[in-house]
Image (cartoon, rainbow, N blue to C red):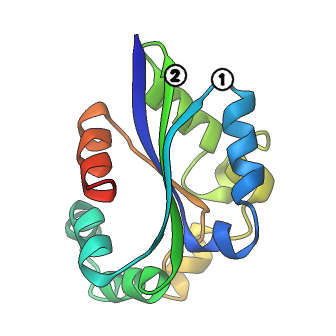
Amino acid sequence: MLTSTFIMLKPDAVKRGLTETILTIFRDHGYQIKRQKEVVVDRNLILKHYEEVIIRVNKPYFEQAILDFFEGQKVVALELQKDGDHVIEDVRALVGATDPVKADPKSIRGQYGDDSLESSMSQKRTLRNLIHASDSIESAKQELALWFR
């Protein structure tokens, strides 16, 4: 059974020219790219995407930090598919820990990350960690619907 997940290559990945490198890594691990589109991010889209995170983080500066990082910037939205029951978990392992400093050196963030959670928090900005990957089948469905209307 093919399982889908949502991936977003964030502005830092796009600006650094890592799009094709990251897509190749996914393909080399057996993922098929079912849908792909470049999006110039608007305020409503990114605030809807990060709505739960903004509530959970509950820091006064966080919403503006997200807007500063994403609004008006290019991202690449992807629907990845692969056969199996653990696609979400496997993609997240391949992407690596949220904090690139703590990511497995063989993961995407471990190889290409150039930021740390500590730095981003001290500077009150969004963590530059290259990729967003859905954390559950439910969030993947919601995010795919949001980004691929």
Residue 140 sits above or below residue 149 on the image: above
Q: Is residue 110 visible?
A: no
Q: Residue at x 49, y 77 (%)?
A: 126
Q: Quadrant of the C terminus?
A: bottom left
Residue 117 sits above or below residue 148 on the image: below
Q: How many marks?
A: 2
Say whether marks 2 and 1 touch (CB < 8 Å): yes
Say which of 64 and 75 sits in front. 75
Say which of 50 and 18 sits in front. 18
Q: Residue at x 25, y 49 (%)?
A: 145
Where in the figure is residue 61, as x and y percent of width and height?
33, 88
Q: Is residue 136 left or right of residue 29?
A: left
Q: Quadrant of residue 55?
A: bottom left
Q: Quadrant of the N terminus?
A: top left
Q: What's the amino acid at mark 1?
A: Gly
Kind of element beneath mark 2: strand
Q: Is residue 58 left or right of residue 135?
A: left
Mark 2 or mark 1: whose residue is earlier in sequence = 1
Residue at which label 2 appears: 82
Residue 82 sits above or below residue 56 on the image: above
Where in the figure is residue 93, as x and y percent of width and height?
59, 34
Q: Is residue 137 left or right of residue 18?
A: left
Q: Quadrant of residue 44?
A: bottom left
Q: Is residue 62 left or right of residue 2?
A: left
In the picture, the disc for residue 148 is none
Q: Is residue 47 visible?
A: yes
Kind of element beneath mark 1: loop
Residue at which label 1 appears: 30
Where in the figure is residue 138, as x and y percent of width and height?
23, 36
Q: What's the amino acid at mark 2?
A: Lys
